[in-house]
Image: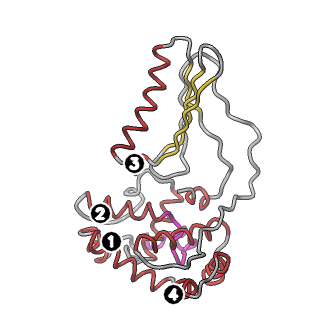
């Protein structure tokens, strides 16, 4: 893993992945009773290949894995007791990686100044810049580090690829059609259930969730809604329910994962 050309060519100076994903990995390791012998792609299941690379880079940048993706002693310490060790470690890393950003916040800097600082210091742009700022702000919030009152995440920047003109539509045949695809959020799936009513018209139920992050009550709520829609079709023979894949604008790899 140390000589992975993809890692080297995209080597960042700061993380630009979802902080929630990183926190989720720490929690997963804690629940599993410890870190794996190596944090490699086979361990990062449920993520796209490009995002796996970004996660590995982020873990390396903040000192949680070494050049060979082997967990460091600090990662072992954190996963052994996240409640005690994770926040202090994040505070150390924030001080190390973002001293100018913290100083700018103390001077009551603006969101535009923050973006310019990230851009100039780390040579970032587009969705990578957005992801880096988002990670910084979310990590600071979790670690209890004060940031500028005017700091906020900039709007997402779409790629240059034109939006596809052809729309995906629900099947017109009276049958249940299921279409699955890669969701823009890790660990989840985006789908729309569309039920055509016997009297005309239709009702849609759209889900856009990371199922790995749902609480027990949230899972019950979401799946009860889905069951109600599907059960209605079973009770009303003339009703038609279809699972429709939602449309997304074409995005570069960084922007896809920025939707976390």
Classify mark 3: helix, strand or loop: loop
Label 4, on which residue? 99
Query: In this rendering, would 164 be left or right of 15?
Result: right
Q: Earlier in the sequence, mark 1 or mark 2?
A: 2
- Determine which of the numbered discs, if any, sits on residue 71 in the image: 1
For this rendering, which residue is in front, 32 or 48?
32
The image quarter containing residue 164 is: top right
Q: Tell me if label 1 and label 2 are in contact, CB under 8 Å.
A: yes
Q: Tell me if label 1 and label 4 are in contact, CB under 8 Å.
A: no
**Which label lies toward us, 1 or 4?**
4
Classify mark 4: helix, strand or loop: helix
Q: Earlier in the sequence, mark 2 or mark 4?
A: 2
Label 2, on which residue? 36
Q: Residue at x 62, y 14 (%)?
A: 199
Q: Main secondary structure of the magenta part?
A: loop
Q: Tell me if label 1 and label 3 are in contact, CB under 8 Å.
A: no
Mark 3–mark 2 Cα distance, whole angstroms, equals 24 Å
Name the spot of residue 196 as percent of width and height, x first: 60, 21
Label 3, on which residue? 214
- Determine which of the numbered discs, if any, sits on residue 203 in the image: none
The residue range painted magenta reads: 2-18
């Amino acid at each position: 893993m140390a000589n992975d050309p993809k890692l080297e060519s995209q080597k960042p100076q700061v993380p630009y992945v979802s902080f929630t994903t990183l926190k989720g990995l720490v929690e997963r390791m804690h629940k599993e009773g410890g870190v794996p012998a190596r944090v490699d792609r086979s361990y990062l299941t449920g993520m796209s290949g490009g995002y796996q690379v970004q996660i590995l880079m982020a873990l390396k940048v903040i000192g949680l894995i070494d050049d060979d993706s082997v967990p460091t002693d600090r990662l072992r310490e954190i996963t052994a007791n996240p409640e005690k060790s994770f926040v202090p470690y994040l505070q150390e890393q924030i001080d190390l990686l973002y001293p100018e950003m913290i100083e700018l916040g103390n001077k009551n800097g603006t969101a535009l100044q923050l973006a310019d600082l990230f851009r100039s210091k780390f040579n970032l742009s587009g969705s990578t810049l957005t992801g880096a700022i988002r990670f910084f702000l979310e990590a600071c919030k979790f670690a209890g580090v004060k940031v500028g009152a005017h700091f906020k995440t900039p709007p997402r920047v779409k790629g240059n690829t034109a939006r596809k003109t052809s729309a995906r539509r629900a099947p017109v045949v009276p049958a249940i059609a299921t279409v699955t695809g890669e969701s823009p959020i890790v660990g989840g799936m985006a789908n729309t259930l569309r039920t055509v009513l016997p009297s005309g018209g239709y009702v849609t139920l759209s889900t856009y969730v990371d199922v790995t992050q749902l609480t027990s009550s949230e899972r019950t709520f979401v799946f009860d809604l889905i069951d109600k829609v599907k059960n209605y079709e079973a009770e009303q023979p003339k009703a038609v329910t279809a699972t429709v894949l939602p449309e997304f604008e074409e995005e570069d790899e960084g922007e896809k994962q920025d939707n976390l």
